[in-house]
Amino acid sequence: MREPAKYEAPLCASVGGDFWFPEREGGISNSTEMLMAQSICRQCTHQAECAEWGIQNEGFGIWGGLTESNRRVIRRQRRITLKEEKSA
């Protein structure tokens, strides 16, 4: 599985890094930023591959349109534990 940095012309590259890691206020991510990021992801040819990368490797941010909580649910269903979760 390729890491997102190896994708050819991903749409997210034109937006900037902080956009994919929405600020949290009181434990809740900014929903406006999340919706905008998800909208960009839905148009990207790498969405499925990026989402799977996020499921397998990332605990934070938006990957392939999936939020942290979306990926957590999928990991639980698939019985996947991230490396960072194993060491905690």
Image (spheres, rainbow, N blue to C red):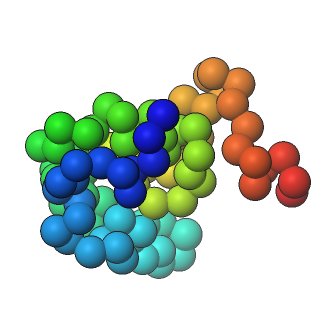
The quarter of the picture where residue 29 lies is bottom left
Identity of the residue drawn at 18% across and 54% down? 9
Q: Is 84 displayed left or right of 1 in the figure?
A: right
Question: Does residue 31 appear in the picture of this structure?
Answer: no
37 to 14, vertically: above or below? above
In percent of width and height, residue 5 lies at 38, 57
The quarter of the picture where residue 66 lies is top left
Identity of the residue drawn at 17% across and 44% down? 44
In percent of width and height, residue 58 lies at 56, 51
- In the orientation shown, which residue stands out farthest toward the top? 78
In percent of width and height, residue 60 lies at 54, 59
Q: Is 85 displayed left or right of 2 in the figure?
A: right
Identity of the residue drawn at 12% across and 43% down? 43
2 to 61, vertically: above or below? above
Question: Does residue 45 appear in the picture of this structure?
Answer: yes
Query: Depth check: 28 or 10 in front?
Result: 10
Q: Is 67 displayed left or right of 78 in the figure?
A: left
Query: Depth check: 59 or 34 in front?
Result: 59
36 to 64, vertically: above or below? below
In percent of width and height, residue 22 lies at 38, 70
